[in-house]
C-alpha cells in the first residue's frame, strides 16, 4: 500500500512538472504569422477581451447573419424591394456586409462551400457562440484580419503602441471604417430610403461597445491599462484613413474594384485615401 502511494505521488509530481514546464513554454513569445487572415470574434475573446465580446454578442453587429434569413425583418426588406421570404444566407452581396471576411483569407464561408477535392469547407455556426458569421471585431478593427496583430497584443500583454499593431493591419480610422457598410453605395438600406439609416458616427459609436455591465470578477484583469496612453497617440490611419472597398457581384462572385482594397497582399502595403 505504502509503496503504491509513493509511486502515485511520484507520478503526480512528474505530471505537475510537465504541466508547469509547458506553462512556461506558453508564456514565451509567439511567432507572428507571415500573412494576415481572419480569425473570428471568439479568438479575440479568448482570455483577453471577454467584456467586449459579451457586449458585442448582445449588440446589433453580433446578430447580422440572422437578418439574411427568410421571414426576418420583412417590412424593411419589402421597403427596399428584397424578397422577404428568400434565404439570403449564401448571397455574395449580402455576405460582404453581414459576415466577417467573406472572400478573404480565413473569412466566413457560406453553406455549400467546397474545396477542389469536393470537401465541405463551410464555416461551422454555433448559435451559442457568434463568430465569423456575424459582423465581428475584425470588420471594424482590421484591414485584412487580426491573425498577426493579435499576437503582438499577446506578446506585449497589451502594452503596445498603435503603430506596432497598425503595421500588421489593425486600423484606427474608426469613423471611416463604418462606411465599409453604412451609407456604402452597395447597401440597400440607404438614408434616402428611410431616416433611420442616416449615419451619425458619434451617436452610433455609443451603441457599438456598451461594455460597462459586462465587467465581472472573472474578467476584471482584462482592463485595458494602456488605453489612456494610447489615446494620446495618433496612428497613420487616423491621419490618412484607408480606402474603402468598392465591389460588385459578377457571375455570382464578389469582386473588389481595383485600387479600392486597403491592403495589397503582394506588396504587403496599405492603401490610404489620397
Ligand atoms: C454595403 C453593405 C451592405 C450590403 C451589401 C447589404 N447590407 Fe444589409 N445592412 C447594411 C447596414 C449598414 C445595415 C444597417 C443600416 C442601419 O441600421 O442604418 C443593414 C441592415 C439590414 C437589414 C435590417 C434593416 C432594418 O431596417 O431592420 C436587413 C434585413 C438587411 N440588411 C439585409 C440585407 C440583405 C438581404 C442583403 C443582400 C441582398 C444586404 N442586407 C446587403 C449593410 C449592407
Ligand atoms: C461595428 C464596429 C466594431 C465592432 C464590430 C467591434 N468594435 Fe471594438 N471598437 C469600435 C470602435 C468605434 C471603438 C472605439 C470606441 C471609442 O473610442 O469610444 C472600439 C474600441 C475597442 C476597444 C478599445 C481599444 C482602443 O484602444 O480604442 C477594444 C479592446 C475593442 N474595441 C475590442 C473589440 C472586440 C474584442 C470586438 C469583437 C468582439 C470588437 N471590438 C468589435 C468598433 C467596433
Ligand atoms: C461590415 C459591415 C458593418 C460595419 C463595418 C459597421 N456596421 Fe454597423 N451595422 C451593420 C449591419 C448589417 C447592421 C444592422 C443590424 C441590425 O439592424 O440588427 C448595423 C447596425 C448598426 C447599429 C445599430 C443600429 C441601431 O441604431 O440600433 C449601430 C449603432 C451601428 N451599426 C454602428 C456602427 C459604427 C459606429 C460602425 C463603425 C465604427 C459600424 N456600425 C460599422 C454593418 C456594419
Image (cartoon, helix red, strand yellow):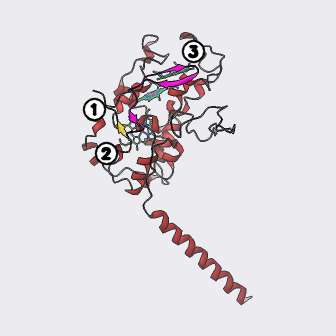
Q: Secondary structure at mark 3?
A: helix
Circle on res. 240: 1
Residue 261 included in the magenta stretch of the image: yes
Which picture quadrant has residue 66?
Answer: top right
Q: Is residue 153 left or right of residue 133?
A: left
Q: Position of residue 272 (x, y in %)?
A: 31, 31
Q: Identify the secondary structure beneath mark 1.
A: loop
Q: Residues within 10 Å of mark 3 (few under 14, many from 20)?
A: some
> Which badge, 1 or 3, is on the more N-terminal residue?
3
Ligand 2 image-quadrant field: top left
Residue extending farthest bottom: 2
Q: Is residue 240 above or below residue 19?
A: above
Q: Which residue is mark 3?
A: 77
Is label 3 in contact with label 2 (beta carbons under 8 Å)?
A: no
Q: Which residue is mark 2?
A: 162
Q: CA distance from mark 2 to mark 1?
A: 14 Å
Q: Residue at x 34, y 44 (%)?
A: 167
- Residue at image position (39%, 35%) is 263
Q: Which of the two marks, 3 or 2, is nearer to us in this view? A: 2
Chain-order first, disc 3 or disc 2: 3
- Tell me, for residue 119, which label it has, or none: none
The stretch in magenta equals 246-266
What quarter of the picture does the N terminus occupy? bottom right
> What residue is shown at x 57% (from left), y 34% (from top)?
133
Structural crowding at the residue carrying mark 2, measured as other residues with C-alpha within 10 Å and reported as few (<14), some (14–19) or many (≥20): some
Q: Count every numbered label the image shows and give the total.
A: 3
Q: Inspect the magenta stretch and tell me whether residue 93 lies in it.
A: no
Q: Position of residue 21 (x, y in %)?
A: 52, 72
Amino acid at each position: 500500500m505504502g509503496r503504491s502511494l509513493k509511486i502515485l505521488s511520484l507520478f503526480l509530481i512528474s505530471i505537475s512538472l510537465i504541466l508547469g514546464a509547458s506553462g512556461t513554454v506558453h508564456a514565451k513569445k509567439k511567432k507572428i504569422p507571415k500573412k494576415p487572415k481572419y480569425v473570428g470574434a471568439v479568438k479575440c475573446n479568448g482570455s483577453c477581451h471577454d467584456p467586449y465580446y459579451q457586449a458585442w454578442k448582445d449588440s446589433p453587429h453580433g446578430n447580422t447573419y440572422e437578418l439574411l434569413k427568410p421571414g426576418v425583418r420583412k417590412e424593411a426588406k419589402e421597403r427596399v424591394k428584397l424578397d422577404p421570404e428568400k434565404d439570403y444566407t449564401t448571397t455574395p452581396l449580402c455576405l460582404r456586409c453581414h459576415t466577417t471576411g467573406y472572400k478573404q483569407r480565413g473569412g466566413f464561408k457560406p453553406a455549400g462551400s467546397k474545396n477542389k477535392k469536393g470537401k465541405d469547407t463551410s464555416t461551422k455556426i454555433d448559435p451559442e457562440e457568434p463568430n465569423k458569421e456575424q459582423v465581428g471585431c475584425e470588420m471594424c478593427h482590421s484591414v485584412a484580419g487580426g491573425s498577426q496583430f493579435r499576437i503582438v497584443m499577446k506578446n506585449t500583454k497589451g502594452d503596445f503602441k498603435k503603430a506596432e499593431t497598425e503595421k500588421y493591419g489593425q486600423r484606427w480610422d474608426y469613423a471611416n471604417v463604418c462606411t465599409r457598410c453604412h451609407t456604402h453605395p452597395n447597401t440597400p438600406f440607404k438614408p434616402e430610403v428611410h431616416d433611420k439609416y442616416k449615419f451619425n458616427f458619434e451617436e452610433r459609436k455609443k451603441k457599438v461597445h456598451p461594455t460597462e455591465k459586462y465587467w465581472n470578477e472573472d474578467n476584471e484583469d482584462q482592463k485595458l491599462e494602456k488605453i489612456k496612453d494610447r489615446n494620446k497617440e495618433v496612428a497613420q490611419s487616423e491621419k490618412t484613413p484607408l480606402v474603402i472597398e468598392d465591389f460588385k457581384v459578377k457571375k455570382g462572385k464578389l469582386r473588389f474594384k481595383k485600387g479600392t482594397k486597403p491592403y495589397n497582399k503582394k506588396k504587403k502595403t496599405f492603401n490610404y485615401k489620397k
